[in-house]
Image (tube, grey):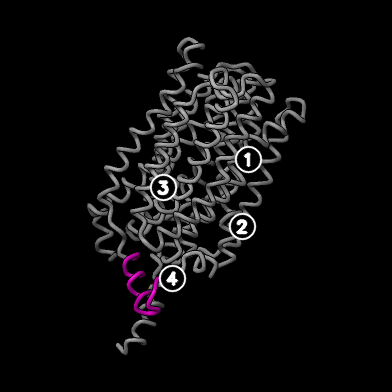
């Protein structure tokens, strides 16, 4: 992409790519935020009602965690397909799968109706959710970053997280509004409505994504691979051409992965179960967080284009670690306005800085022929080890500490330090569109053909 083209703004193809990527991220985060909110405030009563309240909460968060275990599997499988066949087929497949799995959760009868089959069906749907979500971010981030104008990759990559903000608004808003209805109706039927609506979002995403085109960088790389080797490269092998970056990508993603799930998901359970506050209060705060996230994410993305992805991400890590304690202090007050302030301080200001820059930074750590796979490995494994286990770990830590939240603060700080060290060690090549590897392939092809 020439700098002249970049200076004129986005082309129609680029606009379609950004919109297509953002709608998938919206669905990914809608499904996961929605599940997290329900796991904190609804599922213990619907699917684990015969258990002790603490056991029910742990069981609910255990199903939340299990869904993450198939994300790396899905990430690798869909990543290989994306790097060999094309990103478009992956992005269409993942949104359809996510929509069906999430809608299925909303249709499962309670355990009082069908007994043990209820939590088992919940588990199956959750695993399917994880498998399809595993391929979403790598494909979307790769496509958007490759299509973005030179010098603005951080900005346009961050629009994916604006999609996540919209997901927060929609999921939190629906749950907050429905949570104000009579409690028995909400527990029996109301919570199901946002889950069933996921299929509508999936249909919209398919409509937007069916017109996507592969990036020039991807098609050129595929052509050159065939000219040089007579076959397409193995993306998994190519990803580990940079083993340091592959491993560090996982560690880098850990603080980003726990931020929302510590402050918003576990924070909601802390308020409802430990402080006996109404769930709608936390749902409404999540909606407010998402509204701010829509605008804060591109701001951090643009800043990363000026001062570097690495710098912004480290600021996000350290800021998040510093805000966990005041956030939970505010949650403990029981005051609605202070609770919302805690959610904003704990997540929006610095958590979004990490989210807005991570996918672009990971994309810049891998060559084009393995970029989707590399992004998926780092993003999905870190989300499994970090985000998937975060609410469960926090619940267990606070229970062991007799209701005190100080272990959560320590846990967040340790993960943040790991992220900072990994970010400092990673090899990040900003805004070169994979030019180094592309030129290397072109030179090899030229020598082979005698051009």
Q: Mark 3 falls on what kind of element?
A: helix
Residue 236 drawn above or below residue 357: below
- Identify the residue at image location x=48%, y=48%: 134
Q: Which label number is shown at residue 158?
A: 3
- Identify the residue at image location x=33%, y=84%: 446
Residue 74: image location, x then y, percent: 49, 50
Q: Evaluate if marks 1 and 2 touch, with contact meaning CB atoms under 8 Å apart.
A: no
Q: Mark 1 falls on what kind of element?
A: loop
Q: Which residue is mark 4?
A: 233
Q: Nearer the viewer, mark 1 or mark 2?
A: 1
Q: Quadrant of the C terminus?
A: bottom left
Alpha carbon of mark 1 to alpha carbon of mark 3: how far? 25 Å
Magenta stretch: includes residue 107:
no
Q: Which label number is shown at residue 422?
A: 2
Bounds of the magenta span?
Answer: 217-233
Q: Evaluate if marks 4 and 3 touch, with contact meaning CB atoms under 8 Å apart.
A: no
Q: Which residue is mark 1?
A: 389
């Amino acid at each position: 992409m020439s700098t002249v083209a970049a200076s004129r703004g986005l082309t129609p193809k680029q606009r379609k790519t950004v919109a297509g990527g953002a709608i998938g991220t919206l669905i990914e985060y809608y499904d996961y935020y929605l599940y997290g909110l329900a796991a904190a405030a609804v599922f213990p009563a619907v699917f684990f009602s015969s258990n002790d309240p603490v056991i029910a909460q742990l069981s609910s968060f255990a199903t939340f965690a299990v869904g993450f275990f198939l994300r790396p599997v899905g990430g690798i499988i869909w990543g290989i397909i994306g790097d060999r066949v094309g990103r478009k087929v992956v992005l269409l497949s993942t949104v359809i799968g996510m929509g069906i799995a999430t809608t299925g959760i909303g249709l499962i009868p309670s355990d009082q109706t069908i007994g043990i089959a209820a939590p088992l069906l919940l588990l199956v749907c959750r695993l399917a959710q994880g498998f399809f979500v595993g391929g979403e971010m790598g494909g979307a981030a790769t496509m958007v970053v490759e299509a973005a104008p030179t010098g603005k990759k951080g900005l346009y990559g961050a629009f994916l997280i604006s999609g996540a903000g919209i997901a927060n608004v929609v999921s939190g808003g629906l749950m907050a509004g429905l949570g104000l209805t009579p409690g028995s109706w909400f527990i029996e039927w109301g919570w199901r409505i946002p889950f069933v609506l996921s299929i509508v979002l999936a249909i919209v995403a398919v409509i937007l994504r069916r017109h996507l085109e592969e990036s020039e960088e991807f098609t050129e790389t595929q052509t050159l691979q065939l000219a040089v080797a007579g076959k397409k490269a193995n993306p998994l092998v190519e990803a580990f051409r940079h083993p340091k970056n592959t491993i560090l990508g996982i560690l880098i993603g850990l603080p980003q992965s726990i931020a929302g799930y510590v402050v918003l998901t576990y924070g909601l359970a802390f308020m409802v179960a430990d402080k006996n506050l109404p769930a709608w209060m936390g749902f409404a705060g999540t909606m407010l967080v998402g509204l701010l996230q829509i605008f804060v994410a591109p701001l951090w993305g643009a800043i990363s284009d000026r001062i570097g992805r690495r710098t912004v991400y480290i600021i996000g890590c350290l800021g998040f670690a510093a805000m966990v304690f005041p956030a939970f202090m505010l949650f403990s007050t029981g005051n609605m306005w202070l609770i919302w302030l805690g959610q904003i301080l704990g997540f929006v200001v610095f958590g979004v800085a990490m989210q807005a820059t991570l996918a672009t930074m990971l994309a810049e750590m891998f060559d084009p022929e393995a970029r989707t796979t590399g992004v998926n490995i780092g993003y999905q494994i870190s989300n499994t080890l970090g985000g998937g286990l975060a609410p469960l770990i926090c619940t267990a830590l606070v229970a062991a500490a007799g209701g005190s939240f100080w272990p959560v603060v320590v846990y967040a700080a340790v993960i943040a330090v790991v992220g900072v060290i990994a970010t400092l060690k990673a090899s990040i090549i900003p805004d070169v569109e994979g030019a180094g590897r592309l030129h290397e392939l072109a030179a090899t092809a030229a020598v082979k053909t005698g051009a």
